[in-house]
Amino acid sequence: TFLLHRLSNEQYKEMEGEGRMIDVGMTVETSGKFIVSIFDKNDPEHLLKKQKYQEWKRKQENITEPKVYALGEMADKTHTSFGKEELMLLLSCATLFLIYVAVKVIFDSVEETTTRTL
């Protein structure tokens, strides 16, 4: 299961009638591991990862002796800021947690007073 990047109204109107195109790549390793890759040209994260991978690949082609690289070298090291959706999700989770704690405290004190009267 995966989610595609949410399009802006302008992007959505541009694609009207054409549909949304994504690239799907499949690879089978010698061990039998099956890998499915999805690329959405409308997703800024996918574009950034593709650019980083292409830069890494170009560096690999320029090096004559083979070296072993860690996955961290290919990882995205740019510190992008949170989008509006991520901030709303974060605020919603924090609000729900505070409501949960408040209700737990209130009902715990109600439970204590009812047991004392009985």
Image (cartoon, rainbow, N blue to C red):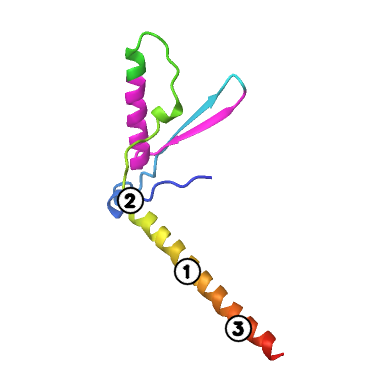
Residue stretch in magenta: 32-58
Callout 2: helix, strand or loop? Answer: helix
Residue at image position (36%, 40%) is: 45
Do tag 2 and tag 3 residues touch (Cβ < 8 Å)?
A: no
Percent of width and height locating residue 12: 33, 51
Q: Which residue type carries mark 2?
A: Tyr
Residue at image position (56%, 22%) is: 29
Percent of width and height locating residue 78: 32, 38
Percent of width and height locating residue 85: 37, 56
Read off the residue under disc 2. Answer: 12
Callout 1: helix, strand or loop? Answer: helix
Dividing the image into 4 quarters, which one contains the C terminus?
bottom right
Residue 44 within the segment the image draws in magenta: yes
Percent of width and height locating residue 10: 27, 52
Q: Which residue type carries mark 1?
A: Leu
Question: Can you name the residue that lies furthest to the right here?
Answer: 118
Answer with mark 2 or mark 1, whichever residue precedes in sequence: 2
**Which quadrant holds residue 87?**
bottom left
Kindly tell me whether residue 42 is visible in this rendering. Answer: no
**Which quadrant holds residue 94?**
bottom left
Residue 53 within the segment the image draws in magenta: yes
Do tag 3 and tag 1 residues touch (Cβ < 8 Å)?
A: no
Dividing the image into 4 quarters, which one contains the N terminus?
top right
Residue at image position (51%, 74%) is: 102
Callout 3: helix, strand or loop? Answer: helix
Residue sitting nearer the eye, 65 or 21: 65
Q: In this view, does 42 lie above or below 118?
A: above
Q: Which residue type carries mark 3?
A: Val
Read off the residue under disc 3. Answer: 110
Residue 98, labelled with which disc?
A: 1
Q: How far apart are marks 2 and 1 (CA)?
A: 36 Å
Q: Horizontally, is 112 left or right of 16 in the view?
A: right
